[in-house]
Amino acid sequence: MFETSSEAPASVQVVTEAIKEYVDRLGPIWVEGEISELNERSGMMAFIRLRDPSVDMSLSVMCHKSVIAAAQPLPPNARVVLYAKPSWYTKNGSLTLSAREIRQVGVGELLARLEALKTLLAGEGLFDFDRKVELPLLPKKVGLICGRNTDAEKDVVENARRRWPGVIFEIREVAVQGAAAVTEVSAALRELEADTDVEVIVITRGGGSFEDLLPFSDEGLVRLAASCETPIVSAIGHEKDSPLLDLVADFRASTPTDAAKHVVPDIAQEIEMIEELRERARRKLMALIDLEKARIASFKDRPVMKDPHVIITSRAEILTAYRQRSHRSCASHVKLAKEELVQIKARVRALSPQATLDRGYSVVQLANGDIARDAKALKAGDLLRLRLAKGETNATVTAMKE
């Protein structure tokens, strides 16, 4: 460590030598990446460009050709891990890794890593069904991320336009395999996500080997797709292929053609559906009209519609009937009352004193008007008044008999 200032700066040589001294203290390390360039020169040394597939970064690696030979075969864009020591070259100010051993990452190891990543992302809820967004029925614009001049692009565009001729595509042609795939696909996805007119994004490529489809299982790309608000359709490879992007996408299409069938509706089916709905609406409307006609006909057939006075005459007939019933009821009650009165009158007449007198009896009264009831109370010479059935007369007591 050395002190510097604007008045006493360090020279380039001092700085590069200080960096070299620091780097030389570093021990060998294991590094993983993709081989984007491999140059075996005529001499004993080989030069490699080791790239991180998730970001646009790379390191320069040199090694003896025997190290390359020991790792053969190395296919294009092979994923490797290498054991190397960092070296700083003061002449050109560059950092280079001196590789001592190179190992190609096997399919089994890659599968194990993918499974671990899949478990991690699933635990974070990135694959949950409730996070997925429903695709729009008829998007204003469809974003398409695909390879350059590929069959997958043609399948999506042609089948979509065959189903809906007016569909508009915003196409981004990118590398869909190799070292630049993750970077270019991610950049295209960010660009289409920022376009407010794009309502659905299709990410597609044709089939390929397991290694060819690895970019679509990259953690950075998967997390980017999960953060997008625009619905994403994944159509990677064939139905048997299942990169992690399929799990985080809002809809997973088995093929590019299947993706085209789901991002836009079939215009023929929509027209047929509209015609069917129109016919159903017409039948419903005609049924309502027929029902109302029947109701109107029923109203017209009612007596009140034929003769508006029927409502008055019918009520008059009812009132007449009620009046006649009341008259008959009243007359019946009067007749019964008269008969009852006659009977009462007869009973009263039968029980009256006059009736008794009419049968030949008389009422004997004393001079003071009291009724004579006991002969013993009378004396000879008492003046009596006799009340007969017709008229009255006077009498005098002359004798008493027991």
Image: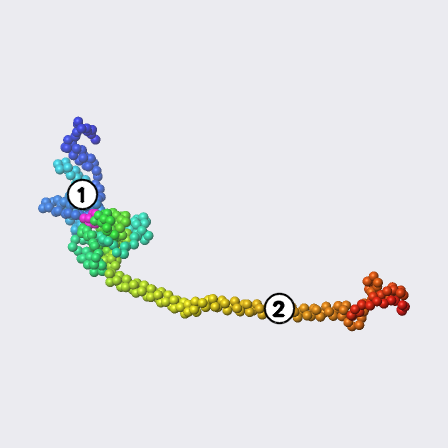
Q: Which mark is residue 59?
A: 1
Q: Which residue, given by chain and number where applicable, does mark 2 sit on?
A: 333
Can the viewer see residue 103?
A: no
Q: Residue at x 21, y 56 (%)?
A: 167
Q: Give how far apart the Cα atoms at labels 1 and 2 are.
A: 128 Å
- Which mark's residue is nearer the viewer, 1 or 2? 2
Q: Please indicate whether residue 45 sits to the left or right of residue 124 in the image.
A: left
Which span is picked out in magenta? 180-187
Can you say whether 165 is above or below 228 in the image?
below
Q: Is residue 292 one of those drawn in magenta?
A: no
Q: Residue at x 85, y 67 (%)?
A: 395
Per the image, label 2 sits on a secondary structure element best described as helix
Residue 230 at what x, y percent from top left? 26, 50
Q: Please indicate whether residue 188 sits to the left or right of residue 364 in the image.
A: left
Q: Amino acid at mark 2?
A: His
Tell me the quarter of the picture where residue 100 sits: top left
Q: Amino acid at mark 1?
A: Leu
| Secondary structure character of the magenta stretch overall | helix
Residue 206 at what x, y percent from top left? 20, 56
Q: Which mark is residue 244?
A: none
Q: Earlier in the sequence, mark 1 or mark 2?
A: 1
Of 185 and 93, nearer the camera is 185
Q: Residue at x 90, y 65 (%)?
A: 380
Would you call the spot at circle 2 few (<14 residues within 10 Å), some (14-19), or many (20 or more)?
few
Can you say whether 165 is above or below 102 in the image?
below
Residue 309 at what x, y percent from top left? 45, 67
Q: Please indicate whether residue 331 sits to the left or right of residue 59 in the image.
A: right
- Please identify the residue farthest to the bottom as the structure is shown: 359
Q: Is residue 182 one of those drawn in magenta?
A: yes
Q: Residue at x 26, y 56 (%)?
A: 138
Check the picture and name the quadrant holding the N terminus: top left
